[in-house]
Amino acid sequence: MTKEKLVDAIANMKDQEALQIARQMLEAGTDPRVLLEAGQEAMVIVGERYERKEYYLPELVVAGEMLKEIAEMVKPKLRGEALAETTPRGKVVIGTVEGDIHDIGKDIVAFMLEVNNYQVFNLGVDVPAAKFVEAIREHKPEIVGMSGFLTLAFDQMRLTVEAIKEAGLRDKVKIMIGGAPMDEDAAKYIGADAYGPDAAAAVKLANQWTGGN
Amino acid sequence: MTNQDQIKQNQAMDDNTPSETTVHIVFEPVGRRGEVPASVSLLEAARRLGVELTSICGGVGICGRCKVRVVSGQVSELTVPEREALSQQELEQNFRLACMAYPLSNCQISVPSESLSTPMRTQVEGMEEAETAIAPPVRTLAVALDPPSLDRPLADAENLLQVVNRSCDTPADSIDLGVLQELPHQLRAWDWRCQAHIRGNEIVAVTPVGAPPLGLAVDLGSTKIAGYLVDLYSGHMLAAQGITNPQTSYGEDIVSRITYAERNSGGAHRLQQVVVEGINQLIGELCAKAGTDRQHILEVVIVGNTAMHHLLLRLPTHQLARSPFIPAVVSDLDIRARDIGLAVAPGAHLYIPPNIAGYVGADHVAVLIATAQAWSESTTLVIDIGTNTEISLITPEGAITSLSCASGPAFEGYHIKYGVRATTGAIERVQITPDRVFYKTIDDATPVGICGSGILDAVAQLRLAGVLGENGTFQRDSHPHLHRVDNQWEFILAERNEYVITVTQQDVREIQLAKAAIQTGIEVLLRENRVSADQIAKVLLAGAFGSYIDIGNAVAIGMLPALPLERFSQIGNAAGVGARQLLLSEPLRKTAQALRSRVHFIELAPYPGFGKIFARNCRLSPH
C-alpha cells in the first residue's frame, strides 16, 4: 500500500513527498529492501515516460537524486544483513570518446541501462582509448558503449576499437556506438557491433547481447 | 555525402582527384549551368556553379535542407538518409538531397526556393557610438613634390620620402612594394601632388589629394558578416552593410565547417577563399554606397570567434575542435591585408584583436571594449547570444570571468520545424491567451516560419498560458490550438489554406536545451564569483538576437535572471562597435591586449556538476 504511494511519488516527481513517505516507512519498520524495490519500479515508469516524451532531462536528474537519497536513508538500516542484491543482467562500460565532451545523450543511455538492471561503469567524457581498455580489464563487462556528438569522433572511435583489439579483448565484449552523426555505416567503419539511435535501442541491443529479449 | 562516403574519403584521403568524366548540370530556376566532375555530389556541383544551397549539417545527409528535384538525367541510387528525409510524395516527384545524389549523366536540376540560402536581416546598426579618442595607426600627409629633371634625376620613391621627411616629425624610411609598383604613374597622373599614408616608418598607401583616408571594420560572424566603412580622421561611419557568410553553404555551424576543412583536401583553403571573396564583395558594396574607392582603405580590423578567426587566416583547426580546444594563437595579430587576399590599399594592414580561448574569440574582446564604459564599477553581465553564446561577468573591482555556452542554432531558426532566419515573413513576436494566438511577422508579410525571437516568445507564452508544463511537456486539452500530429503534440501558431506554422514538442525541447545552456553559463559565472543574481546591476545583451528578444519572456522561462527590467539593456551589435573603435584607436589595441590577459576563462562542460545543473535548468521557470 505505502510502497505504491512511494512509487507514485517518485514517478510523479514529488521529491519532498517521496522522501517523507520513505522516512515514515522506515520508522514504521518496513523492510528497507521494499523501499529500494519501490525506487526501481518508479525508475521504470520514469524511463517509459521519457520514451513517450512526457518527461525530459530534468525528470531524469530529479528521479536519480531521489533514488540516491532514499538509498542513503536505507543504508544504515540494512546493518549487517546482506542486501538481497538482484544480480545485474550484465555489465556495461560506457563513455564519450577522446576529443569530445558531450555527455547528456550518453548519460541518458547509462540511466536507461541502469533502470533495466545493468551495472553501468560510466567513464565520463573525453575518454582516451587506453582508459576504455583499462576499464574493460578491470570490470570485465559484456558490453562497451561509445558516444560521440562530433563527426570528428568517427576516427577516435575506430582507434578505440583497435586498441581494444590490440589488448586482446575484442572478442570479450560487444561494442555499441551512439551520438547524433552516427549510423550503421559509421558502426561498420569504426568496427563496432551495432549502432543505436536512442536510449531505448541501446537497451534492446544490450538485452539481445545478454541473451534476452 | 553519406557517412559511407566520408569513410571512403577518410581511407582515400582525397576526394578532389580530378575525374576523367565530367557532366553538364543545369540548375533552374536560378539559371546556373556548367561542367562538373561526375564524382562530386549535386551539392558540391551547386557550390561550384555558384548556387548557394542551404546545408546545415555540412553535407552528411542529416538536415534534409538541400532538397532538389531531378527534372531530367540520371543520378545515383536513393540512399537511406534520403528515404528518411523525404516524404513519399517528394520521392515520387524525384526529389533528392543534393548532398546524397551524384550525377551519372547530364542533368537538369530544379532548386526549390526554400533550399536556397536566403539573404537575411543582418544587424549593422550598433549601440550609440561611445566616445573614442581618434588615434589611428596611419598618419596622412598631403605633399607636393618637385618633378625630377636631368639636373635632378631623383628616383620617385626617394623624391617622395624626402618631401615626407621634410614635413613630418616622425621619419618614414621605406615604401611598401605594392605602393612602389603604382607610384611612378600615379605621381605623374596627379601632377606630383598626393597624400602619403604612413604607418610606423613605412608608406603604406598613396592617394590623390582630397580622398578621405578610410578604414574598414568587419564583424565576421559564423552566419553573418557586417562591414563598416569609417573615415579614419573624423571617425564618421560612411556606410554599413551586412551579408550572409558564404561559408554557410559548407556547413551552418563551426564544427561542420571544421569537419569540411579536415575531410576535403584543399577544404581549408576553399573556406578561406570564399570568406575573403565575401568580404571583398562587401567592400565593393560599401564603397559603392559611400561613393569611394577600395584603394582608399588604409587599415582593416576584423573580429570573429576563434574558429572564424582560424578559418579566415587558414590556421589549423584540428586541435581547436577537440578537447582541450587549443587555439593556434591568442595574441593580437597585425599583418598585411593582402596576405589573406583582401583587396584594399596595397600596403594596408589587417589588425585582429586577441582571442580569449577556443570558444571565446576576438569578437567578444571587441564587445568588452565597446561596453567598457558601461560596466566600469558595477557588477555587470555581458551576454552575446548566438550559436555559441559568450558571457562575461565583471565585478566592481574589474575582475572579468568569461565562458562560452553551446546554446546551439535554435535561436537562429535551425532544428525548429518551421524555423527560419530573421527574414521577411518570419514570425518575430507571439502572444498567447487561454484561447487565442496573436503574432507579428517581420515587415508584416505573410508568415513563412518562426525566427528566434518568435520561438522564444512562443515557448514562454505557452508556458505562461499553462499549455506547457514546467518540464516543457504539452498539457493535453489545454488550448484549442493544440493538436496531436504524427504522435507528437503540435501547437498551431498560424494557419491558412496555403500554410500552417506550428510549434512542436521537439521544438520546445530544442529551446529548453538552448536556454538551459545560457542559464547554466550565467549560474556558473555567479557561483565562481560568489555573486548572487540580485547583485547584478546591469545586464548588457549584445548581438542581433539579444537585441530583438522580449526580455520579459526570456526571464519567464529562466534564460535570463529575474531582475527588474530596467537593469537590462539591448545594445545591438557591440562587436561591430568595438571593431570600429579598435580601427580608430591604436592605444585601444593595447587596452584590448591587456584586457585579454585579465580575463579568467572557464571551460563550462567539464565544470563540476555541469550536467545536473544543466538538466535542472531545462525547466521552464524563472530563476
Image (spheres, rainbow, N blue to C red):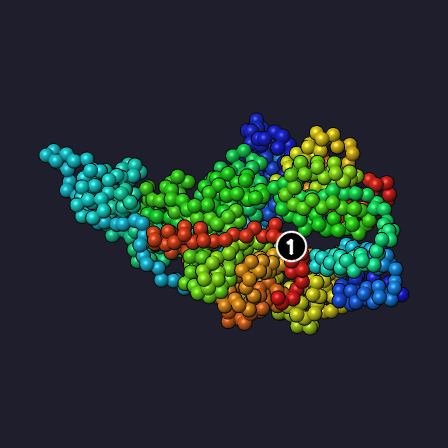
Q: Nearer the viewer, residue A87 or A210?
A: A87
Name which residue lies at 71% across and 50% down: A107
Q: Residue furthest top?
A: B20
Q: Residue furthest front?
A: A80
The answer to whether A94 appears left or right of A5 in the picture is: left
Q: Nearer the viewer, residue B605 or B294?
A: B605
Judging by the rendered image, the residue that carries numbered circle 1 is: B609
Name which residue lies at 72% across and 39% down: A135
The residue under label 1 is which amino acid type? Answer: Gly
Rendering coords of residue B119 (x, y %): 51, 53
Can residue A204 be seen at all in this image of the molecule? yes
The answer to whether B34 appears left or right of B481 in the picture is: left
Q: Residue furthest left?
A: B151
Q: Chain of mark 1?
A: B
Name which residue lies at 44% across and 51% down: B596
Rendering coords of residue A142 (x, y %): 79, 39
Q: Nearer the viewer, residue B381 or B254?
A: B381
Q: Quadrant of residue B228?
A: bottom left
Q: Nearer the viewer, residue A161 or B490?
A: A161
Vertical position of residue B522 compared to residue B39: above or below: below
Rendering coords of residue B313 (x, y %): 45, 41
Identify the secondary structure beneath mark 1. Answer: loop
Name the quarter where the N terminus of chain A is drawn: bottom right
Q: Quadrant of residue A158?
A: top right
Can residue B422 be seen at all in this image of the molecule? no
Q: Quadrant of residue B454?
A: bottom right
The answer to whether A61 appears left or right of B286 in the picture is: right
Rendering coords of residue A182 (x, y %): 68, 42
Vertical position of residue B125 compared to residue B355: above or below: below
